Amino acid sequence: MDDAEFSAAVAAVTSAFGDPTRRDIFLYARENAIGVTAAEVAERFELHANVARHHLDKLAAGGYLNVHVERAGSAGAGRPSKRYKASEKVLEFPSRRDDLLITLLGRTLALLPEREAAAMAEEVGEEYGRNLARQMSPGEGHRSFQAALHAVAEALTAHGFAAHAEARGSSIAIVAEQCPFGATATQHPVICAVDRGIVKGMLGGLYGDTAPATTASRAQGDATCVTAV
């Protein structure tokens, strides 16, 4: 693992478990075979329900908790509640197997015309992003634009991008300090369309349709990767 990969892995784990209360909540959820609800976490840790839900959603964004919707009552009346259950994700640094898969993906995209390869990479990323959004907010309405952006940044960080949302002129951007694609992105910059697609897919699922655009890329020599929305 090189320095960039190490930094990205540390950022992902820190984002999810840097808060001691969040660590305790994760352990509490892991100890409950059927999972926990935000109300149960709020009562257990003496938190406001919204704060408990924030911690649970952050863990879910990182893939450490799976989310299931429970309908209220036998007739399905009332607002559905979410139950959070520990996933099978292992707390470990990325393996070299991931590097091989990324390299093969880059080589596969390189066999296609650039425009076609970019469209395919973005489509794959968008589908993955929409799946992430469904896991984070099953059965719920859309979030506000700001809340959706921060959820996207947290999910990207959990995937090794060390990302955050910030204002850039008249738009808001997702800024990624690291790139989990490593040298493959430099050799095949078209792969950067994958993370643009993830942003588009997640925002589509959490907020609504948008048209993200890549305005800076580490693969092209920029200091960070920037996706403007």
Image (spheres, helix red, strand yellow):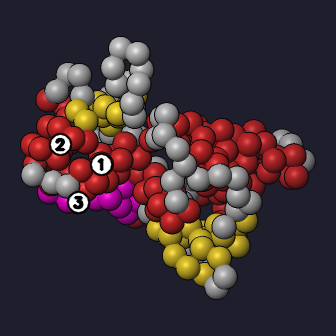
Q: Give the residue at mark 1.
A: 53
Q: CA distance from mark 1 to mark 3?
A: 17 Å
Q: Nearer the viewer, residue 43 or 129?
A: 43
Q: Residues within 10 Å of mark 2 (few under 14, many from 20)?
A: many
| Marks 2 and 1, the one that precedes in the sequence | 2
Q: Position of residue 217 (x, y in %)?
A: 65, 69
Task: Indicate the secondary structure of the residue bearing disc 3.
Answer: loop
Q: CA distance from mark 2 to mark 1?
A: 8 Å
Q: CA distance from mark 2 to mark 3?
A: 18 Å
Q: Give the residue at mark 3.
A: 18
* Image quadrant assignment for residue 183: bottom right
Q: Is residue 78 above or below residue 166?
A: above
Prevailing SS of the magenta stretch: helix
The boundaries of the magenta stretch are 6-20
Confirm whether the magenta stretch covers residue 15. yes
Q: Is residue 9 visible?
A: no
* Residue at the image position 23 percent from the left and 22 percent from the top: 34
Q: Nearer the viewer, residue 88 or 171?
A: 171
* Image quadrant assignment for residue 220: bottom right
Q: Residues within 10 Å of mark 3 (few under 14, many from 20)?
A: few
Q: Mark 2–mark 3 contact, CB under 8 Å?
A: no
Task: Kindly give the residue lying farthest to the bottom in the view shown.
Answer: 169
- At label 1, the amino acid type is Arg
- At label 3, the amino acid type is Gly
Q: Is residue 8 above or below residue 215?
A: above
Numbered mark located on residue 129 in the image: none
Q: Is residue 107 above or below residue 34?
A: below
Relative side of 115 to 47, left or right: right
Relative side of 78 to 172, left or right: left
Q: Position of residue 18 (x, y in %)?
A: 23, 60
Q: Give the residue at mark 2.
A: 41
Task: Indicate the secondary structure of the residue bearing disc 2.
Answer: helix
